[in-house]
Amino acid sequence: MDQSHTGRQNVHSFKRWFLRRKVSLPCWVSWQDRQVRGKTVDVSYAGVGVLLSEAIDVNVEALVQVPEGIQLRARLVYLHQENSERCLVGCKIELIERGEQQWSNLCYVPRW
């Protein structure tokens, strides 16, 4: 098998299905009996990156509430502790509970 073809195939398989869009909005992240204020850093149809004031457990289901009535049910899949006061979490969206059209508009990335 041609190695150059295999290399291109591997590169292609690691590309994201949906492009991320840099968006900074206030939000609330709730899980179990806790609620923490945060700020979105990027969004896509499949996920959202949120900067929080405290660390939380990965692999927990959370509710992410964004302005304009957007409410997302998401699974936390990534955690990076920025410093003792802030951490970045990556959330995979499992369900858009409210504001589906607003979320789609927010995530839209034009392709030129």
Image: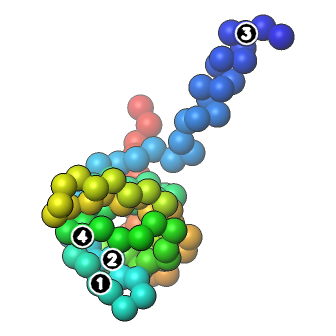
Marking on residue 54: 4
Q: Residue at x 37, y 75 (%)?
A: 64
Q: In 3D space, how far apart are the residues under numbered discs 3 and 2 (Cα atoms)?
A: 45 Å
Q: Where on the picture, by quarter, is residue 53?
A: bottom left
Three-letter amino acid code of the residue under disc 3: Gln
In primary-sequence order, the first of circles 1 and 2 is 2
Secondary structure under the numbered disc 2 in the rendered image: strand
Does any portion of residue 97 appear in the rendered image? yes
Distance between the Cα atoms at labels 1 and 4? 10 Å
Q: Amino acid at mark 2?
A: Val
List the residue tagged with mark 3. Answer: 3
Question: Which disc, if any, is residue 29?
Answer: 2
Crowding near pointer 4: few (<14 within 10 Å), some, many (20+)? some
Question: Which label sits in the foreground, 3 or 4?
Answer: 4
Badge 4 element: loop
Q: Farthest residue toward the bottom?
A: 33
- Toward the right, the furthest residue is 1
Residue that badge 1 annotates: 35
Circle 1/circle 2 CB separation < 8 Å: yes
CB within 8 Å, label 3 to label 4: no
The reply to whether the C-beta atoms of the residues labelled 1 and 4 are less than 8 Å apart is: no
> Where residue 77 appears, x then y in whole percent?
49, 60
Query: Which is nearer the N-term, disc 3 or disc 2?
Result: 3
